[in-house]
Image (cartoon, grey):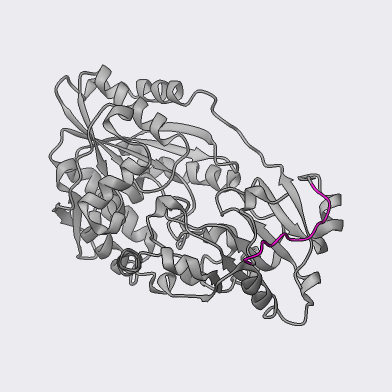
Amino acid sequence: MVPRVFRVRQIFDCPRIQNVADEVQRQLTALELSRQIRPGHRVAVAVGSRGIANLVVLVRAIVDHLRQLGAEPFLVPAMGSHGGGTAEGQQKLLESYGLTFSAVGCPILSSLETLVVGHAAQGFPIHFDRLAFESNHVVVLNRIKPHTGFCGPIESGLMKMLLIGLGKCEGAAIYHRAIQTHSFTEIIRGAAAEVLRCCPIRAGLAVIENAYDQTAKIEAVRSEDFESREPQLLALAKQWMPRLPFREVDLLLIDRIGKDLSGTGLDPNVVGRKFNDHQAAADEWPKVRRIAVRGLTEATHGNALGLGMTEFCRSSVLRETDFAATRLNALVSGHLSAAMIPLDYENDRDMLTTALGTIGLVKPPNAKFVWIADTLHLGEVECSEIYWAEARRREDLDILTPPRELSFDTSGNLPVFADMV
């Protein structure tokens, strides 16, 4: 038996930029880049592997602004070991996001070749993309958000892009090994300072998204202000990020995971597994007992990093997995357990029935069950009937349907989350 479910819409605080391209132009104009960027200068625009809302619009607006200055922009993949750890794979990953010459107005130049531009105080070499280093200027684009595994005043954003992104595969591997011994804050502040000193970093475009995966804030930041401004932007990102609607969950069902959604496929900040792959820390919320996954995103190209943080999956997920890319990502990031394989089942009914049998003495119909599309899109959530009374009292939840049975097809599978009626 499985619980009956009802659908809710979460009401989040959601600032939103209506005209993204215009805001990019406004922000970059305020930096007065024409004082440094001259006609004919080559400018590397660093773009990562995360799925950022309005990514094509953002990149095109940066390119347009640089061309207005007479510069010659080009894109460089800034994604460490992603894309299978090959130059061709990283270029294809950007192209799969729609970042083609016709869409953004400049070429992608992809290479894994790096230069050692200095050494950190801890002694390890600092790698930097050769093509970006040899350009006249570098502009970095990234979303500011909580990191999937580390806490501090600076987490995922512009500073991280300078190291793990533009360090390419070799640099990312060194930085992740260093983090085994030294704190993330030590590494990112010390090594990034050396990159800023030695490399032609001109500016960054920081993006914050709201809980509905929409562009909430865009800010152009001078390179010398990266370290002081990022903590303030991170605080906003944490305030606006999406969350599960309940603090305790027996079983969380996720339609899809992928690198375009989170560095670990599913965001540990959302599911409460930032410090331990299979259990929330004492002061960490929500508390999710079991996680089951139904599929991978198309944009992850078979990279199933994060699957090892779940307990159950459909067998089809394993058939979709590019194990070489997943293992490489796990080894470079140092998060080995994230590539391990959960228990797999051929259909949803068998997977859910088995998972519900592992949650303790709670009878399956009374289980605290939550079903989501993915950890980035939490505007609507399916919840089991046990939450009904609480949901009716909550002003931040709109109940969209009455409780109803889960609808399995003849193969024992549920519809995709969006089609559940």
Quarter holding residue 96: top left
Q: Residue at x 59, y 69 (%)?
A: 347
Relative image position of residue 367 (x, y in whole percent): 76, 70
Total marks shown come to 0
Magenta stretch prevailing secondary structure: loop
From this viewpoint, is residue 327 visible?
yes
In this picture, is 307 found above or below 157? below
In this picture, is 282 found above or below 62? below
Quarter holding residue 140: top left
Relative image position of residue 312 (x, y in whole percent): 56, 73
Q: Quadrant of the N terminus?
A: bottom right
Left or right, 78 with respect to 234, comes to left
Q: Residue at x 70, y 80 (%)?
A: 357
Relative image position of residue 255 (x, y in whole percent): 57, 58
Relative image position of residue 214 (x, y in whole percent): 54, 37
Q: Which residues are magenta?
A: 401-411
Left or right, 27 with respect to 280, comes to left
Q: Residue at x 43, y 45 (%)?
A: 51
**Viewer-closest of 409 and 273:** 409
Left or right, 1 with respect to 173, comes to right
